[in-house]
Amino acid sequence: MRIYRRWHVVGAAGSLYKVLQRAKRERLREIIIRTCEELGVQIMTSVLARDYVYMFLSFPTKLFLSDVMPFTKNHSPRRILTE
């Protein structure tokens, strides 16, 4: 039996403006899904609103939240800005 950690994660835009418009939101969803698959993280539930991102994540105990979040929180928006 594998043991998984489960976390509720909420991220908000730094300026709290509604910056995640439809095209950016869909691209961000694709990037987060791909990044989580690479890390072995399962997204149980996710909501991408205009001004925040909510995710319920499940990942193996060999990973910590501090290992997962830099990839989903920092690298994903950078990819969108470079595109």
Image (cartoon, helix red, strand yellow):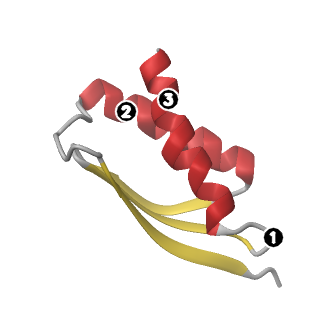
Report the quarter where the N terminus lies.
Answer: bottom right
Do residues under tags 1 and 3 come within 8 Å of each other at their CB atoms? Answer: no
Element class at badge 3:
helix
Amino acid found under the numbered disc labelled 3: Arg
Please provide percent x and percent y for residue 39: 72, 51
Quadrant in which residue 50 is drawn: top left
Please provide percent x and percent y for residue 30: 50, 35
Please provide percent x and percent y for residue 64: 69, 69
Position above or below: 2 against 24: below
Please provide percent x and percent y for residue 47: 33, 55
Q: Residue furthest left?
A: 17
The first of marks 2 and 1 along the sequence is 2
Query: Going 29% across and 46% down the picture, which residue do you hit?
Result: 14
Front residue of this view, candidates 1 and 12: 12
Q: For this view, does 5 lie left or right of residue 29?
A: right
The first of marks 3 and 2 along the sequence is 2
Mark 1 and mark 3: span between their CA atoms? 26 Å
Query: Going 33% across and 28% down the picture, which residue do you hit?
Result: 24
Q: Which mark is residue 26?
A: 2
Residue marked by disc 3: 78
The first of marks 1 and 3 along the sequence is 1
Mark 3 and mark 2: span between their CA atoms? 15 Å
Quadrant in which residue 41 is drawn: bottom right
Query: Going 25% across and 30% down the picture, which residue do you hit?
Result: 22
Mark 2 and mark 1: span between their CA atoms? 30 Å
Position above or below: 7 against 40: below
Amino acid found under the numbered disc labelled 1: Lys
Q: Name the mark nearer the viewer: 2 or 1.
A: 1
Query: Going 52% across and 74% down the picture, which residue do you hit?
Result: 7
Residue marked by disc 1: 62
